[in-house]
Amino acid sequence: MLHRPRRNRKNEVVRSQVRETNISVDNLIYPLFVVDGQNVKSEVKSLPGQFRLSLDHLLKEVDECMNLGVKCFDLFPAVDESLKDAMGTYSYSDKNFYLKYIREVKQRFPEAVIMTDVAMDPYSSDGHDGVVKDGKILNDETLEVLGKMSVAQADAGADIIGPSDMMDGRVEYIRDDLDLAGFTDVSIMSYTAKYASAFYGPFRDALGSAPKFGDKKTYQMDPANKTEALIEAELDYAEGADYLMVKPALCYLDIIHMLKENFPIPIAAYNVSGEYAMLKAAAQNGWVDYDRAMPEMLLSIKRAGADVILTYFAKEFAQMVKGK
Ligand code: PBG
């Protein structure tokens, strides 16, 4: 036998020499849920190990993560129902606690990179990502709200704006608004191929942001479609996105791979709440070995072509790497 591929697997030194993919904490973004108040740290039932944090706990969490090497955070606000309205006006209000938290984190940790979420759902009394009229989600009317929200977040100190709403034309609209307001250095990580997925369930529990009627299928993509992701990616790239994101990650590795092959900018993947919950549940039952399965999941997303991974596993991965 001339070829014995097993020779390159014979011990760990050789295996690490020839390993094609490595994953580092540098590639990870840690999503965190925040809530108004003081001394609040309430666990999200369907996301064991993930919490809604008030500012004091948020600062502590960021500090711990920074020490572990996790330096980029995507913040999501859980907003009180009484502050929600049809136009999501709280999203850019001076009184918005989320904007205040961003300011505080950036002040305390200037070297932390803060990503924010742009979509109306946490602020909308309809629970949709856009403006609703007669049961329909309006595209162009929503852009105006998204633009204002983006500028308010950039003004608070956000480094990366993450439009997760799937309205057409929003990347260009937001880019224009940011530039006009002088935020030319603020990046846009566009949720480019965001699918109408069942795997967002625990996230909507965390924020109480589930749609009050219907579903998100008229704006989020059909899980059956692949070519359509190319159309979305071409638009976002042309409109000035700095990163293209695929979401969810694990059921959509083919999409990650395709975008990586076709576009010259960094590809991000969102390892979503339902994916985290599935593994946590199986591990709690003793059905899979968490310590092996978790890094294997992250590795598969990286191997598919993601440069950056948003994942609730970020902190535990960093702890694992550091042997803590
Ligand atoms: C809101 C938003 C969602 C997620 C990120 N931003 C939910 C949705 O579109 O309903 C999901 C993240 C996750 O499940 O971890 N636009």
Image (cartoon, rainbow, N blue to C red):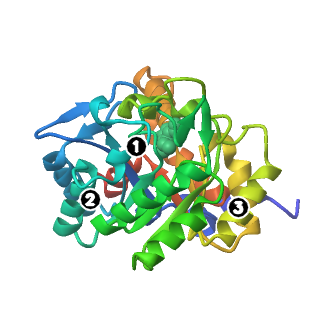
- Horizontal side of residue 324 vs 8, given as left or right: left
* Residue reaching furthest to the right: 1
SS for callout 2: helix
Res. 233 mark: 3
Q: Position of residue 184 (x, y in %)?
A: 45, 79
- Give the answer, above or below, for where 242 lies relative to 164: below
Q: Quadrant of residue 92?
A: bottom left
Q: Which residue is at a point 35% across and 61% down the rendered structure image?
A: 153
Kindly check if marks 3 and 1 are in contact, taking CB atoms under 8 A apart as contact.
Answer: no
Res. 39 mark: none
Kind of residue at badge 1: Gly
Q: Which residue is at a point 52% across and 34% down the rendered structure image?
A: 200
SS for callout 1: loop
Q: Quadrant of residue 149?
A: bottom left
Q: Earlier in the sequence, mark 3 or mark 1?
A: 1
- Which residue lies under the disc numbered 2? 102
SS for callout 3: helix
Q: Position of residue 62 (x, y in %)?
A: 24, 56
- Which residue lies under the disc numbered 1? 88
- Foreground residue, 95 or 69? 95
Kind of residue at badge 3: Ala
Q: Which residue is at a point 24% across and 55% down the rendered structure image?
A: 94
Give the Cα distance between marks 3 and 1: 27 Å
Q: Position of residue 310 (x, y in %)?
A: 47, 52
Mark yes or no: residue 47 visible: no
Give the Cα distance between marks 2 and 1: 19 Å
- How crowded pointer 1 is (Cα within 10 Å; few <14, some 14-19, many 20+) is rated as many
Q: Earlier in the sequence, mark 3 or mark 2?
A: 2
- Foreground residue, 59 or 216? 216
